[in-house]
Image (tube, coloured by chain):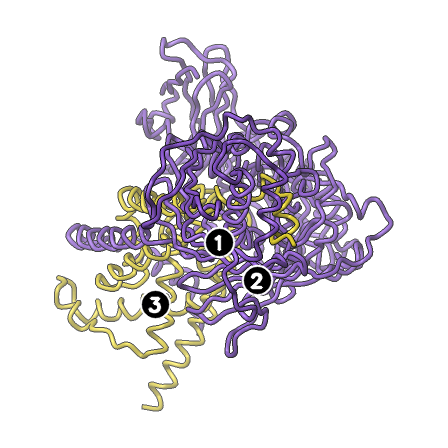
């Protein structure tokens, strides 16, 4: 025989009362802290070059780690162009270009130091004349070929190979920026001769180059270059820059060698035998659809993009916007790289996440997402534009001022910025607590509602004296399978205390909430259709009791218009019964508002020992951040509330 | 012949600056989890240990799992960016505890529960029975869906309200209520099945 829910709840309740003894807690915490100290020491070790960067939460960002090697090469390349033959701090472009063109390969090692002085892993980089680049570290290697848009990352430790098809560097302006223009625009005083120094046992000319072009991102970037007077090429290079909060980062390039013989087999894209191969990215983009709404779908916060809506199945999405360019993650990620977005679709709950991306966001080849919100926010919008439309974010995080994320949970947005421009928009569905406020969501819910009314439920409402109570409002909540959609309607009982609720042919959960002045609001429910609702159901209301109090400021003056919300804290398991009191005694629209005397009252509180939680708010005063904060702080008891003379003090903002 | 790839000959400053900064800043972020974890242990260490104890019923296991929790969180990107690190840690702790139950079942770990009852003032037999009941309920909870199990633990064992749980899980109180209800019903079925099995075994004996 199945145990009764009450028995299970009793056992769970007993479990909740298990309290550890202080000695054991202290001991466990000491062990945990020791473990943490060990981990911190481990973190101080070099950073593997292909470890996921913690801040890069999106899988699209993963390949960006590999861009480090490009960074190093780019710096060397620029320095080569900066330093003119003979060590003169003048530019002789023709000679420089000629010099560079004479070389056939480049190899160097690089290592860095993070802002907290932690060493980053040493990487050896090899570059071939055809543009192929190989980066080697202790844990593996990566090869990139910009011509064939391909990259391979080989990790020895777990024997995995990742191949990125359609590999592209995140540079939307790649064709617009010309390094020669860049050099021409550099002031002559940007290069400073320093006294000669000995480095790695060799005498070298030393230059300090002011990297003005980096100064938009990092503060005071300077590059110190050691040049071999014989070859007139750099042999050692140090790049130092300030990052946030006065911290400095350093990148050193050393053992720089030009024209050293390099084995071409080192640049093979054939995965080593016995390794697990994962391939991602798209080699060739398919033809784009003709319809503008598919090419530049409108971003509708919390709802979807263009014709796509959260909760839609993969099949439905594909029927609306066509097949994706590719799939990932067991076909739960639909890649529309040619249109600049990806979709995460759960087999059970449908579309869960939309990521609108740009080339800056990823090393996989993508077209920048062309859609915008109705206010015109999209890829490339500035931070100011976003804040003008959506307001200040609830939270922002970032590596620094130039690379950050803004969080708008109420809109279901996480927007990523680089250099003050939006480079990606992550969208999730916005769930609402009670009634759906969004028309679009209601529309989508209605679409999923069964249209036929199969049956009715007649409700009789009676008072404690068993006489019918008229005017009782009953709000229903009908939920469909997997909570995918619901409908809320309000009914009012007639003079006989009766109302009829129409029910659809199939649903999952039915919840009824009553509200009537002077009576405790009641909750009746049939969850996951554990039992079919009867044709007639009688709700017996309980008379409510009065509570109240005053809201005043620090000077003791009444605050008019303060919103007082009251919640009844039910014991766990109490609402497992078919009917019980609701939590919501006075919330949202039913909240109490203080009068000219700062007074408020509420007449629907159950009698006896109950636990109440208050939430006070006023636009000009600091209210409760969460339920019961001020109540606890100012030690307001149930007795005080019942006597209706308690005073809650609010402080000005 | 030019040895540089085309895009390096015309490099976007953005390309290398971003990658350069990203790589460095990674180091900075790696140092942050430690600070986050330190304050987590300071603020919520006791709660987390208590939760692990309630879910494993063993001091030594709770101790081990708290250390494992620290390791997991130090590697977790989600923790690093969590709005509420304690809620995040609590969810990971729940997963760890039920993973331990699963492992225990698979490996057939024998508990030294016989030693525990003698330390209490209550009747050792009653304590043993209670312990078995708890074991049964926890073992069956392991078979629930992750979300349903998390809701049950947070509501019935950690005594959070639906609203608080909804806030922690980023869902609505209504959905939490539904999940709790469904979880209890499922648990009821599972316990019915396991008690039947136990009865049958008894008969066979």
Q: Which chain is yellow?
A: B
- From this view, report whether residue A452 is shown above or below residue A614: below
Location of mark 3 (residue): B100
- Choose between A92 and A78: the one closer to the eye: A92
Residue for point 38% across, 65% down? B98
Location of mark 2 (residue): A530
**For the residues carrying marks 3 and 1, which lies nearer the camera in this image?**
3
Residue for point 34% across, 55% down? A13
The x and y percentages for residue A319 are 80, 59
Location of mark 1 (residue): A577
- Chain letter of the residue carrying label 1: A
Would residue B76 appear left or right of A359 to someone viewing this image? left
* Quadrant that contains the C terminus of chain A: top left
The x and y percentages for residue A446 are 75, 48
State if disc 2 and disc 3 touch (CB < 8 Å): no
Q: Which chain is purple?
A: A
The x and y percentages for residue A195 are 36, 33
The x and y percentages for residue A327 are 67, 63
- Choose between A22 and A636: the one closer to the eye: A22
Looking at the image, tell me whether mark 2 or mark 1 is earlier in sequence order.
2
* Quadrant that contains the N terminus of chain A: bottom left
C-alpha separation, residue under disc 3 versus residue under disc 1: 33 Å
The secondary element bearing badge 3 is classed as helix
The secondary element bearing badge 2 is classed as loop
Pointers 3 and 1 within a single chain: no
- From this view, report whether residue A264 is shown above or below residue A356: below
Residue A292 visible here: yes
Pointers 3 and 2 within a single chain: no
């Amino acid at each position: 025989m199945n145990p009764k829910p009450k028995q299970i709840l009793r056992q769970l309740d007993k479990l909740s009362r298990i309290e550890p003894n202080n000695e054991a807690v202290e001991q466990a915490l000491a062990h945990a802290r020791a473990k943490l100290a060990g981990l911190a020491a481990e973190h101080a070790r070099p950073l593997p070059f292909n470890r996921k960067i913690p801040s890069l939460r999106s899988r699209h960002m993963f390949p960006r780690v590999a861009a480090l090697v490009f960074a190093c090469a780019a710096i060397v390349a620029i320095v080569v162009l900066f330093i003119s033959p003979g060590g003169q701090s003048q530019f002789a472009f023709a000679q420089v270009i000629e010099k560079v063109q004479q070389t056939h390969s480049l190899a160097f090692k690089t290592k860095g130091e993070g802002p907290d002085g932690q060493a980053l892993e040493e990487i050896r980089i090899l570059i071939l004349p055809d543009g192929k680049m190989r980066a080697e570290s202790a844990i593996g290697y990566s090869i990139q070929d910009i011509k064939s848009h391909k990259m391979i990352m080989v990790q020895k430790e777990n024997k995995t190979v990742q191949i990125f098809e359609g590999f592209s560097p995140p540079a939307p302006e790649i064709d617009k920026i010309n390094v020669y223009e860049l050099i021409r625009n550099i002031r002559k005083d940007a290069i400073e001769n320093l006294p000669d120094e000995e480095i790695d046992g060799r005498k070298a000319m030393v230059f300090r180059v002011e990297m003005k072009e980096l100064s938009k991102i990092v503060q005071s970037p300077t590059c110190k270059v050691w040049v071999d007077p014989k070859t007139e090429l750099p042999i050692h290079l140090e790049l130092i820059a300030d990052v946030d909060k006065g911290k400095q980062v350093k990148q050193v390039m050393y053992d720089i060698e030009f024209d050293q013989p390099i084995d071409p087999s080192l640049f093979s894209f054939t995965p080593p035998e016995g390794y697990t191969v994962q391939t991602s990215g798209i080699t060739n983009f398919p033809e784009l659809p003709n319809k503008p709404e598919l090419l530049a779908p409108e971003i509708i916060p919390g709802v979807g993009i263009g014709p796509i809506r959260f909760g839609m199945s993969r099949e439905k999405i594909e029927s609306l916007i066509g097949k994706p360019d590719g799939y990932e993650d067991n076909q739960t990620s639909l890649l529309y790289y040619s249109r600049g977005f990806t979709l995460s679709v759960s087999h059970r709950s449908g579309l869960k996440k939309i990521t609108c991306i740009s080339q800056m966001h990823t090393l996989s080849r993508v077209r920048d997402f062309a859609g915008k919100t109705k206010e015109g926010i999209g890829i490339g919008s500035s931070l100011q534009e976003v804040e003008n439309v959506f307001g200040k974010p609830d939270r922002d995080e970032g590596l620094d001022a130039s690379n950050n994320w803004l969080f708008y949970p109420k809109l279901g947005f996480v927007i990523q910025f680089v250099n003050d421009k939006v480079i990606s928009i992550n969208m999730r569905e916005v769930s609402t607590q009670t009634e759906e406020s969004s028309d679009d969501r209601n529309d989508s819910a209605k679409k999923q509602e069964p249209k036929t009314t199969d049956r009715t439920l007649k409700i009789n409402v009676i008072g404690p004296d068993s006489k019918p109570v008229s005017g009782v409002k009953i709000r229903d909540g009908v939920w469909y399978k997997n909570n995918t959609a619901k409908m809320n309607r309000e009914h009012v009982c007639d003079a006989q205390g009766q109302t009829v609720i129409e029910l659809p042919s199939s649903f999952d959960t039915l919840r009824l909430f009553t509200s009537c002045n002077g009576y405790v609001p009641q909750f009746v429910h049939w969850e996951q259709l554990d039992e079919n609702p009867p044709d007639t159901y009688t709700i017996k209301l309980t008379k409510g009791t009065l509570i109240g109090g005053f809201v005043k400021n620090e000077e003791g003056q009444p605050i008019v218009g303060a919103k007082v919300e009251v919640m009844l804290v039910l014991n766990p398991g109490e609402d497992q019964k078919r009917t019980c009191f609701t939590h919501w005694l006075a919330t949202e629209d039913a909240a109490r508002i203080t009068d000219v005397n700062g007074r408020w009252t509420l007449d629907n509180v159950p009698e006896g020992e109950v636990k109440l939680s208050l939430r006070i708010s006023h636009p000009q005063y600091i209210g409760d951040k969460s339920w019961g904060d001020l109540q606890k702080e100012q030690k307001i008891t149930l007795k005080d509330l019942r006597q209706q003379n308690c005073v809650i003090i609010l402080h000005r903002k | 012949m030019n040895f540089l790839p085309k895009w390096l000959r015309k490099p976007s400053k953005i390309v290398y600056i971003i990658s350069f900064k990203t790589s460095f800043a990674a180091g900075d972020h790696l140092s942050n989890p430690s600070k986050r974890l330190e304050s987590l242990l300071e603020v919520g260490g006791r709660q987390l240990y208590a939760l692990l104890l309630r879910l494993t019923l063993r001091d030594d296991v709770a101790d081990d799992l708290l250390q494992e929790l620290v390791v997991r969180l130090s590697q977790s990107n989600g923790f690093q960016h969590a709005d509420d690190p304690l809620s995040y840690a609590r969810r990971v702790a729940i997963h760890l505890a039920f993973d331990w139950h699963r492992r225990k079942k698979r490996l057939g770990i024998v508990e030294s529960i016989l030693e525990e009852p003698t330390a209490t003032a209550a009747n050792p037999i009653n304590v043993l029975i209670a312990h078995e009941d708890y074991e049964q309920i926890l073992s069956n909870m392991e078979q629930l869906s992750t979300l349903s199990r998390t809701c049950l633990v947070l509501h019935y064992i950690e005594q959070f309200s639906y609203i608080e749980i909804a806030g922690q899980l980023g869902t609505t109180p209504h959905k939490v209520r539904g999940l709790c209800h469904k979880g209890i019903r499922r648990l009821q079925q599972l316990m019915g099945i396991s008690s039947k099995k136990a009865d049958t075994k008894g008969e066979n004996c």
